[in-house]
Amino acid sequence: MRVAVGLVLCMLMACIPAASAQFDPEQLYAWPGDPVDSHVHMTWAALTMEVNEWADDYPEIVDLTSAGESELGKTLWVVRLSDWSMDTKPNGSAKEIIYIDGGHHGNEYLGTALAWLSAKWYINGWVEGNEEAITVLQNTELHILIMLNPDGNDFDTRWNINQVDLNRNYDHYWNTCPTTQPGSSAFSEAETAANAAYINAHVTDADLYVTMHTGVWIILYPWGKWPEQPPDWELFWRIRDDVQANISEIPIQNANQGLYPNCGTSRDYGYGQMGFPTFTFETDDEQFVPGSFENINDRLAEEMDVMRFLIENVWYWRARLDVQSITVSDDDVALEVVNNGLASTANASLEYHSLTGEVLWASPYFTANASNLTSVSFEVDDDVFDADGRWNLNYQKRVINAATWVNESVDSNLTVFLDDEDDRFLAGVGLFNPVAVMLGIIGVAVLVRSEDEDCEEIGPQS
Ligand SMILES: [Zn+2]
């Protein structure tokens, strides 16, 4: 009897591999490539078939478009991922935008594979009902140009067909470092010109740009041109510290420090010209074990964990000012503002607009540091205000000069006018009206309390 049970068990277990092979989840992450030398090589043709299948199979989340063509006329596919049934986030606000590209260097397959996986992970997650993938796609647009240099990719070479290093061909201090093969001028090559055109047409408001390469296992933030830390060092360091504390020990550093100056890169262009928080993500150079196939999701699991962190938290990669109060007295305007983002802003200003939109008063620029409450006050002649005006807050999303400007109206209910000279701000209410007197008392109480709280003015950090 025991032997019989054993036999039945063996037969049952023998069935399991056969059954699971039909539903092999690993196939979901199979790399569409053939081995070339010691690498697994995805041709441009294989990529073309695959991204078109994605668009055919999942039109609700995959919008396939092109950034242009390579020098030899190969389409530069851009996979746009989002829940396209909604133009906005579920809460009605604009979706965050992320730009990713891969394959500047045609022989860096693993970096290109990470760009490919950054699309595939969210497509598979959506199909499988993964909550993180669904939430990201409802709140974010991912624009992913997987293979920027298809001619170089198919010839297994770093350069494009004109023997130009595409990652030295961007219009940011082009050809100002010792370098080889940067091209005849910035954007002389079809691939880089197309990439920049796409960026400037479709993702100018991006809050993350990651460009994928292969070399030394490292993540690089700007600058490549200079050894100094970038103006948004605080944001880059915070991301570095969070990644290294919680996800991966991958080194994260300024692209110039400890390496060599590199100019005309897409990373420095993305930050210096577009104002994006930009990273070069370099996978290791072991590529694939010779003669073996590896599941790309396993091979790049740790790198993908870092990417998922950067993508899921994109909301924080900028300044996000939220006015707490505006108090106007005879000769000054006091503002309290919280920055909910992890980037500082140096060029914030408060404006008072007339009903017709005319700027009646504008504060000087002030700084609001990341994750901080900032209290500032400005001397004013209160004659400039009129009761029907509106407050506007202007600031840049990051410290870098190129950062996008935000222009937001401020909820007028957050304003308190303290005025004992006349009744201009108490529209329709006489000065000695009991309601006006009560409002004045409340206003003074608010002022006294805010002084008790000892709000410090927070200046820029060095
Ligand atoms: Zn590279």
Image (cartoon, rainbow, N blue to C red):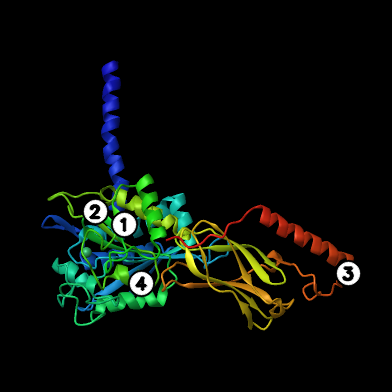
- Classify residue 180 by image quadrant: bottom left
Three-letter amino acid code at disc 1?
Leu
> Along the polypeptide, which appears first: circle 3 or circle 4?
4
CB atoms of marks 4 and 2 within 8 Å? no
How far across and how far down the image is residue 362, in percent? 60, 77
Dot 4 alpha-carbon crowd within 10 angstroms: few under 14, some 14 to 19, many 20 or more:
many
Question: Which mark sits nearer the N-terminus, 4 or 2?
Answer: 2
Q: Check disc 3 and give the amino acid type.
A: Phe
Residue 307 x %, y % = 36, 55
The answer to which of marks 1 and 3 sits earlier in the sequence is: 1
Q: Is residue 396 visible?
A: no
Position of residue 269 in the picture relative to residue 443 (left or right): left
Three-letter code, disc 2 = Trp
Q: Earlier in the sequence, mark 2 or mark 3?
A: 2
Q: CA distance from mark 4 to mark 2?
A: 24 Å
Q: Which residue is mark 2?
A: 217
| Ligand 1: quadrant of the figure | bottom left
* Mark before the other along the chain sequence, 2 or 1: 1
Q: Secondary structure at mark 4?
A: helix
For mark 4, what is the residue? 272
Please tell me whether mark 1 sits on a helix, a strand or a loop: helix
The disc at residue 117 is 1
* 345 vs 61, nearest the viewer: 345
Density class for disc 2 (Cα within 10 Å; few <14, some 14-19, many ≥20) is some
Q: Is residue 312 visible?
A: yes
- Tell me the tag on residue 432: 3
